[in-house]
Image: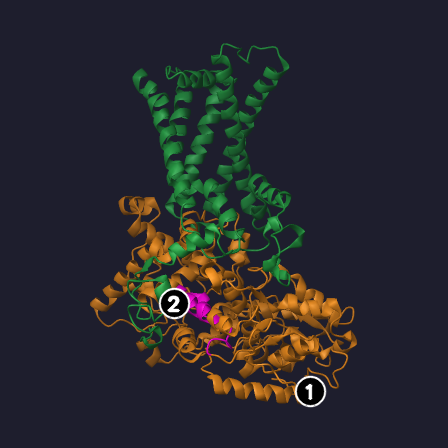
Chain colours: A green, B orange
Amino acid sequence: MQSLSWFVTGPFIYLAVLIFVVVTAYKVVGYANMPRHLRWDLYPVPRQGQEGSKYQKVDYSKMPPFVSAFHEMKAISQEMLLIKKAFDHNPQLWMGTFPLHIGLYLCALWLTCLTLGAGIEMADMVDYNSANSTLMTAMKYLTLSSGVVGLTAGLIGSLNLLWQRYTDEDLRCMSDFVCYINLYLMILLFGTGFAAWAIADTEFSVIKHHIMSLLQFKPGIINHASVVLELLVFGIFLIVLPFSRMMHFAAKYFFYHNIMWDDEMMKPGSKMEREVSKYLNFKVDWSASHALHQASWNEQVSPAQGKGGSWTDEETG
Amino acid sequence: MKKRVNINEFGSAESCISLLGAEDLLPLPGESKEQFKPVKDSFVDKYDFSLDGFSALSLPVPKTKDEEQAIVRTFLQGLEKLFDKQNNWGFLQPTTLSTSYCMQCNTCNNACPVFIESGRNDIYRPNFRSEVLRRIYRRYFTSAGKLLGKWGGADLELNWRVVYHLAELSYRCSVCRRCASVCPLGVDNALLTRELRKLFSQEMGIAPDSIHKSGTMQHLKTGSSTGMGRSAFLDNIAFIEDIIEEKAGKRIKIPIDKKNADILLIHNAGEYISWPDNPAAFAILFEAAGLNWTLSSESMGYEGVNYGVWYDDIQFARIATAQIQAAKRLGVQKIVVGECGHATKALVSIADRILTGDMSIPRESCLPLLESFVTSGAINFDPSRNNFPITLHDPCNLVRLMGIVSPQRNILRHITPPGQFREMPDSGINNFCCGGGSGFAIMSSHNFPEWRNSLSCRRKARQVLDAFKDCLDPAIPKYYCAPCSNCKGAARDSLIEHFGFKDKYNIIYGGLVELMVNAMANMRQPFISWEDEF
């Protein structure tokens, strides 16, 4: 039993972290390297500030783009921290999703504090649980409060969302199994974390020392079943996360910055122009009769150069 | 009749999976609803009406197993190509992200005018068709879906009915993107609607005839989606010069094919045929402002529309490229697109990233230029000439999708007396579609116009009534200003003819330039009339 516990809290956690990092990086790099798509912006674009869209000006293409980092930061902060669109357009959902996300943010802070604390202790400096300095005391209480509040908020939020899925007929009819699996996983994640704190680790010292052993690549054995369970669920969560739609935390960046707020114009001699020129030579394989088969995009728009003759003479579907 | 429709039953063999009844629609004030006309049995035998009792595509019912299998096979081929870099580089990233990350929270639902006005019919949810697409994609193209089935979010078995229902359903959304604007993540279900239309067109040759065969194909062949050739265009210009002479009291020679002009003005050619007062008003304003401008009589040079933007990237690219080439041959400094939302978005915004090298000539909406006429004092306006209630429609393509919000309002404030211009509820970027967006205004297959006029345009009708609620008395003439040809088409067919707003409330519709000319101080007679319009 002890070796199983050691495996779960040691090698399994390493594996989970590795999978999470590698798959997340693979996906993010994959999205980032996709071809620059056609314009598909959606207004308002916050970085245009109070000036608004440049399309509202005569000869806009001769004007330098107006960029307001403040307005962009304000909009993205409201969206990330407060989930403003859900608050504005779906307040019922917000009642669940806001505490869930605040719970996640606080738990991320909690893990960061625990890891920092473990690092400080590893460097033979001090255990903040027994230190007297103001800074260490602040860190202790920050760890405690972010952990307890984060786990509680996350649990409340995920339970609320699950309750909504079951009781709201409209949500139910649109939900697939994965929705429920994800929510149960979140409930388990926060629930086991909360239980481990309440039952065995009220100061988070057990988990902190275990993190220290993991950082030293000498994973120890945890003798508290609730903490082992907490780590097992955490490991499963890390493995599932990058494969699931819960990875929207990374996708959201692309949705906002690369699609809705991407108002960059084509400029002669630009990198974008060079990239697009390359894309226009991609071969097209669509089968309808009006498409020229195995012709490039350039050839599709220039029938004289195309392989399939004039596109205006094609049969139509 | 409204009933619950589960996604995994989307391919059921019922005669109609979610029949829309007139009684389901949210009532409008003062409306006496009539039942939808029954579809003839001969049509039902021949074409597929099994989604909601309407047909936008005239899809022929397959007769054999082979035909059924071919529908499924070609659909899957097309679906694979949607996620392929070579075949869909232009929308690969947004399509992939919107397919992968919907959390099924339904926030988009209340943003959709079709879903709300239908009495919340499940199949019209903006995320319904996307969710069908996602489940098929997972089932056939992801490891989780293949291995885990419903546990991997892939609980929909594909058959020809699913494909047909999805094809029809892709023409029950006007791609206004209001749903995307409220999504906390940025998932764009409207984009997926367009991607579905693209799959059906580019792979399966399925598209509404009005948009493809007598739309983009005719456009590329004759130079205009209306089929208007050069000589007909020139005849129309002569007719418009007559209109100007009659209304303005002096003849204007409209410049045609003027080389090296500052501006090539390009209209939706539908204006020349259906609303010639609109290009006439442009000519009056441009001449009064002393602009160096021209129209083109060359094929592709006098037609601003690009229906490809609604359903087909190949057709879109062909038309946009040909329009730019026509402008280049004239040597103009820039193109200004008249009052047409989709044409403006297509040529100014979306085409931007396919126009490389010397193809990248400046392109603008007409609205900022028109605004400059009132702010610069280039033309003298007398606001008292527009002394009637006016409300403004915000075309989705110009407003939510290009951010052009203030010029038209600034113009109206200058050319109307205080208190006569009133915003409708949900104006600006929160606007609702006119109901004719994404091709709906020109689609005429079977009973589709009945669906459009009674459901798709219903929210706009409600907004217009709300904007004029203090002056609905027909003794007071009212003007619904829609600076977009497509939106005017929807207003004509739905607000005026279907809902009877002219007869009941004395509301007429028209563009912005007509109001501007109506307010010009030196016009000898009103340019707008409630008597001889429509």
Name the residue beneath numbered marker 1: B247
| Crowd class of label 1 (few under 14; some 14 to 19; many from 20; radius 10 Å) | some
Residue B322 in magenta stretch: yes
Residue at horizontal 75%, vertical 86%? B524
Is disc 1 placed on a helix, strand or loop? helix
The correct choice, above or below, for B197 with respect to B380 in the image is above
Name the residue beneath numbered marker 2: A301
Provide the residue span drawn in magenta.
B299-323
Under mark 1, the amino acid is Lys
Chain label for disc 1: B
Cβ atoms under marks 2 and 1 closer than 8 Å: no
Q: Nearer the viewer, residue B81 or A238?
A: B81
The count of marks equals 2
Name the magenta segment's main secondary structure: helix
Residue A249: horizontal and vertical position, in percent? 48, 40
Report which quarter residue A244 is drawn in.
top left
